[in-house]
Image: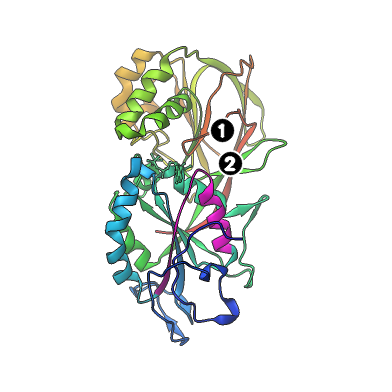
Amino acid sequence: MLRYNCCFSICHDTAKQPSFLSAQHRISSNLSSDGITLRGCGGAGASVSSSRLRDLVFVVNPQGANGRTAKEWKKLLPYLRSRLGKDCNICESLTSGPSHAIEITREAIRDGADAVIAVGGDGTLHEVVNGFFWEGKRVGNLNSDTSHSAALGLIPLGTGSDFARTFGWKNDPCEAVERIARGIRSRVDVGVIDQEGRDLHYFINVADVHLSAKAGFYASKYKKFGKLCYVIGALQAFMGHHNRDMRIRVNGGEWEIYTQVTALCVGNAKYFGGGMKITPNAVPGNGNLEVVVLQDFKWYDFILKLHKLYSGTHLSVNNVSSRSVQSIEVEEISDSGSIYVQSDGEHLGFLPRKFRVLPGAIDMIS
Ligand SMILES: Nc1ncnc2c1ncn2[C@@H]1O[C@H](COP(=O)(O)OP(=O)(O)OP(=O)(O)O)[C@@H](O)[C@H]1O
C-alpha cells in the first residue's frame, strides 16, 4: 500500500505500469510515442537510449528550510512541467514527516522510476539516499532486469544545502532543472555506517562525531532562524563540552590513540554546517572518504580559526589531521556515553563502530 500522494503522467508501457499510477492528480499529461529515441530529459545531448518517457519522481519536503522549500517548489512547478514534461513523466510526492522520503524512494525505485530527485535540504537528500538501499543491498526495479538502475537527483532547497556546494551548485532550482534536463549521470560513492545489531545506515555528505555533531543537533532545533541556526547550535554545543580520548583504526590496520578529540569528521563530500569546508579533499567519486580530526580545540580556537574552517585551509593548523580512508573504526576510550554523532545532519544517538565507503554506489544526475 503506497503511503504517498503521487502525481504521475500516464506511462506508455502497460506491462510495466508503475503502481504509483494510482496518482491523485497529474503534473504532466504527455504520452510516450513508444518509439525508440535517443534523449535525456529535454533532449539536450544525453546519450540515453530509451523507448519511453523517463519516469522522474520528485520527493519534496514541504517543511524544508522552515517551509521555504514548499513555496519555492510551488513556484518552480510550471517551469519544471514545461521544461521536462515533454520527455518525462513527472511524479511529485510530498513527505509527511521524518523518514517518509526513505519509503517513497524505495517504492518508486521498485516501481521502475528512472530517477528519484530529492527536493529540499541535506536531510531530505540523506533520506532519499537511504531509500536506495534495503537490507544492505541496492533496491531494484521489481519489473525489470538488473541493468536498469534509478539515478539520484537533487534540487537543493534547504537551509544549509551543503552537499550541493561540493559540486558548485547553487540553491537555484532552475539551474537544477537544467541539470535534470541534461540527464548526465556520474557515479558517486556513498558512506556506510556499520553497527552490530543495527541496520546499515548510509550517508552521502559528511558523518561526524562529537562537538560538530552536537552543534548540528542543536542547530536543527533553530532552523527557523535560517543559517543563523548553525551559530546558535555551535554556542549551545560548547556548553558542557569536553574533548575525549579516542581510538581509531584505519582500513583494518593498527589501532591508534587520538587524545582530546574535539571532532572527527568523515567526508564523502566537502561541506557541512552551512558552508564550512570541513573535509576539503573529499571527492564524492574517488572511492575514498576523507577523515579530518580536530584535537584539543578550545572555544577560542574556533573563533580564531573559523575563517580557516570555512575556507578549507584548516588542515595546516596545529592539532588538525586529515587522511584518506576506505574505512575507519572509532571507539571512545573512556566510554563516557556523551558522544554525539550525526550522519548528513541526522542525529544518530549512538557512536557507531565503523564508517566505510561504498565506491560508485549510486548514479547521480550531475
Ligand atoms: N513533512 C515533514 N514534516 C516535518 N519534517 C519533515 C517532513 N518531511 C521531512 N522532514 C524532516 O525534515 C528534515 C530536514 O529537512 P531538509 O534537510 O529538507 O531541510 P533543512 O534542514 O532546512 O535543510 P539542510 O538539511 O540542508 O540544512 C529531514 O531530515 C526530514 O526528516
Return the x and y of residue 160 as percentages of the image width and height: 35, 39
In the picture provided, is 230 more to the left or to the right than 186? Answer: left
* Labels 2, 1: front one: 1
- Amino acid type shown at disc 2: Gln
- Amino acid type shown at disc 1: Leu
Q: Quadrant of ligand 1?
A: top left
In the picture provided, is 85 more to the left or to the right than 269? Answer: left
Q: Label 2 to label 1, Cα distance in Å?
A: 21 Å
**Looking at the image, which residue is at 66% across and 50% down?**
136
Please, which colouring scheme is shown?
rainbow
The one of 63 and 144 positioned closer to us in this rendering: 63
Give the number of the disc on residue 326. 2
In the picture provided, is 207 more to the left or to the right than 77? Answer: right
Numbered-mark total: 2
**Looking at the image, which residue is at 40% across and 77% down?**
39
Give the number of the disc on residue 233. none
Return the x and y of residue 22 as percentages of the image width and height: 52, 69
Kindly indicate whether the residue at mark 1 contacts the one at mark 2 (C-beta within 8 angstroms): no
| Quadrant for the N terminus in the image | bottom right
**Looking at the image, which residue is at 64% across and 17% down?**
335
Q: Secondary structure at mark 1?
A: loop
**Looking at the image, which residue is at 56% across and 65% down?**
149
Instruction: Judge the density around disc 1: few (<14), some (14-19), many (≥20) Cα neighbours within 10 Å.
Output: some
The one of 6 and 286 positioned closer to us in this rendering: 6
The one of 147 and 257 positioned closer to us in this rendering: 147
Residue linked to disc 1: 348
Per the rendered image, the range of residues in magenta is 88-109
Instruction: Judge the density around disc 2: few (<14), some (14-19), many (≥20) Cα neighbours within 10 Å.
Output: some
Residue 185, compared with residue 316, is above or below; it is: below
